[in-house]
Structures are given as structure tokens and as C-alpha cells.
Amino acid sequence: MQPLFDGVILAEGKTKVIGQSPDDPTKVVVVSKDDITAGDGAKHDLLSGKAAFATLTTCNNFRLLKACGIPVGFDEQLSAISFSAPKCEMLPYEVVIRREAHGSYLKRTPGLSKGHLFPRLLVEFYLKTSGRKWKTHDLRCDDALMQYDAEAGTVSLFEPSKPIAGQVPFLVLPEAEVFSHAEENQFFGQMSAIARRAFLVLEKAWQLEGGRLVDCKVEFGLAADGSLLLADVIDNDSWRVLEDGAYLDKQVYRDGGELDAVAANYRRVAGITSHFRIPAQRIIIWTGSVNDDVSALEKAITKISHGCMETTRIACSVHKEPVRAIAELNRLVQEKPDTVVIAYIGRSNGAGPTLSAATTVPVITVPANFKEFPEDVWSSLRTPSNVPVTTVIEPSNAALAALEILALRNPCLAMHLRETLEERLA
């Protein structure tokens, strides 16, 4: 049998091989296998085509995350079953992000029902081990749930399959016996933040395809420059995804599903993730004059979107030049249909409703002179039928409303908005 990787193998696991790139000493080649396992290897089969499905899924996920500014260990797909990545020193942690209660979490919290929703993402850390050993210590289980106490400088290990209430750690290690780097205590906050953002991106991407991402496992590594990267893989073994109430992921295999059904799901997920993308969108800021000050609105859009949303400013009086205004609006929407218009209008408060009547994209009116002439707002509030303009007094709220509309179809933007919301829930 021809070897999966014809070169120097740096590491090999149950489902993949990590090889040294023959062209660049700072890169590795990640090669997937057709192996599928469950129960920490107790259950093992060969699933024809899994390597290709897993590689495509990981590459699709990493490309999207990279486009959203997430630091990932991924360069490019090399073949049907391999991709290149920066060489990393992998950290011995599995990071699990949960939106719903499934799997081992239900065993630890038997009072919760399956699918219990967490409005704020939960992030858990597990110490990666094999053979129930950590250095010189014997363990009760592999991949123990860990709790890091920075103040005490200790890492406590718990059995992940037993109720956490009343459970005492079966082993407490000083951080020096776990950490390999002087500043590793700072990595946990960084890993948690990156993992949350990655989940939020993938969660929205799945929502757009009719799926529901309920949990996901990721791993991290240190690049040669010391930067923290979300590395390894994110494939159909890494998460739980529901479609119409049924799992599309490895859970089907864990539950004893037929291999043909498991393969069909892996193939389907690879195809679905090929649709993951950031759409072309923009906000049109419409003013009646080039002299109108929209700096507060522009700053709000940039701050809320973290600079990821394109804006176009149009200065045209809808009252004085109605033909030109409608022609300009039609041209811009034709160029980029996924658009929201914010009409930042002074005395011409009827401009927003007029624009709204001439297009099918959302139009938000901001009455710029509301404080001086509050009565003028009525021309934006009392509109005829088929004129669904929205009127918002505060420019920053108008920016947020426009971005929330666009975030319904944009994983990157959805990540930023949801992250801000969940920080308020902390």
C-alpha cells in the first residue's frame, strides 16, 4: 500500500498524518485518513472517502475563518486529502465551545435536557492525554476536563463523564507541571476569545445553510513567531451539527449508524461547507449635500463592524434632482443588491421615504435636524402604503440597525455583533 505521505512524518494520529513540507521548513502538510473512531479508539472503521470529505470540510472552514480575521493555521489545500499549514508547536488542550447541551455535558449536568440553549457560549478546556498518563501521573481517564486557577497557579482535573456537582478533582497539578511556556497562563483568555469568534462565524455560516451548530472542538498551536493559531483541523469529527433535528456529524457513527449513512453525511457536510463565504455587501450613506457632516455615522459603522463593512456616500437632493437620485439608487443596488441605505437628511426629511418607495432594499432615515426641528420627523414617520422606511433618531443606532440587517447573511459581521452582545451577558 502506498504511504499517505512520502516524506518526513512529524506526527501521526488516528485520523491524520502531519508531515514536514518538502519545500519549506516552516510549513507542514496535514494528510487525512479514511479512519473513523469513537470511544477514544474503542470503535474503529475505515470509511471510504472520509479523508477527502474531512480535508475539504477543514479547508472550507479555515478559508472562511481566515477571511474573517481569525488567526488560523492554514495556507492552502494541496490535494484531495491534504493541505499545508504553518508549523506549530501544538498546545495540549482541547477547547470545546457549546451553544447547546449535548454529549458529555449532559452527563456532567444531568438536570439539563438535551438541547438546552446557552445564550452566552460556554467554553471548556480539556487536557489532551493518551494511555491515561500525564508525565509521571496516572489518570482516571484521558482528556480530562480541566479548570485552571490562575490565582492559585493550579490545574484541576475532573472526569468529564460524571456529574460535576459535588465532584472533586481527581488530580490537582501545579501549573509548572502542565505549562511549557513562561506566559502560558495568558493563553487561556486568548484561546477562549479566538474559539468563541470562530464558533460564531461557523454558527452563522451553518444557519445560512439551514443547519444548527451546537458545539465544536478546536485546538491551538504556537507559530514560529510565538503567535497563537487555531490549528489542527475543523472537520465533521470536530462538531455537532443538526439539520431538521438530525445529526449530520460523527454523532451518527457514535450512535451506531450504518457506515453508508455516516459517509453520506460526511459527503453532504463537505458540500455544504463549500458554500461558506462572506457576501458582497455595503451601506449607502445618502445625504442631500456634500457639506452634510456624516462623520458620527461613519465612525459608528466602522466601530461596530470592526471595519469590515464597505460604505458608499452619495450626495444628491432627492427633492431637487429626483430623476438623478432614483437613477443613482438603481445603479448602486444593481451593482451590489445586498445593500442597506441610510438617508442622513436635514430639512428634506421626505427623502428617505422617497428612496424607500423606489427600491426593495431596506432604507433607514436619520433626521439630522431632529433636535432643532422635531416636527419635521413626521414626514419620515407618516408614510403612504408600500413605503416601509425605518426612522431612527440616533445615528449610532441607525448604523447598528443597518449592520444587524446585513449580519443576517454575513458570518463575519454576525460574529462581531454577537460577540459584543454576549460580552454584555457575561
Image (tube, rainbow, N blue to C red):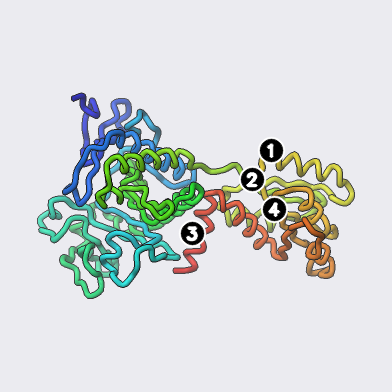
Residue 220 in sight: no
Q: Where is residue 363 in the image (x, y as percent from the top left)?
A: 72, 54
The residue that disc 4 covers is 362
Q: What residue type is labelled 4?
A: Pro
Q: Which amino acid does label 1 sit on?
A: Glu
User: In the depicted view, which residue is nearer to us: 410 or 256?
Assistant: 256
Please state, as top left, top right, bottom left or bottom right, where the C terminus lies in the image. bottom left
User: Residue at 70% of width from left, 49% of height from top?
Assistant: 361
- Crowd around label 3: few <14 · some 14–19 · many ≥20 (10 Å): some
Question: Tags 4 and 1 in contact by the CB under 8 Å rule?
Answer: no
User: In the depicted view, which residue is nearer to us: 37 or 292?
Assistant: 37
User: In the depicted view, which residue is nearer to us: 27 or 249?
Assistant: 249
Q: Which amino acid does label 2 sit on?
A: Asp
Q: Which residue lies furthest to the right in this view?
A: 320
User: In the depicted view, which residue is nearer to us: 164 or 156?
Assistant: 164
- Crowd around label 4: few <14 · some 14–19 · many ≥20 (10 Å): some
Q: Give the SS element for disc 4.
A: loop
Q: Residue 335 carries which label?
A: 1
Q: Give the SS element for disc 2.
A: loop
Q: Where is residue 403 in the image (x, y as percent from the top left)?
A: 61, 54
Q: Which mark is residue 338?
A: 2
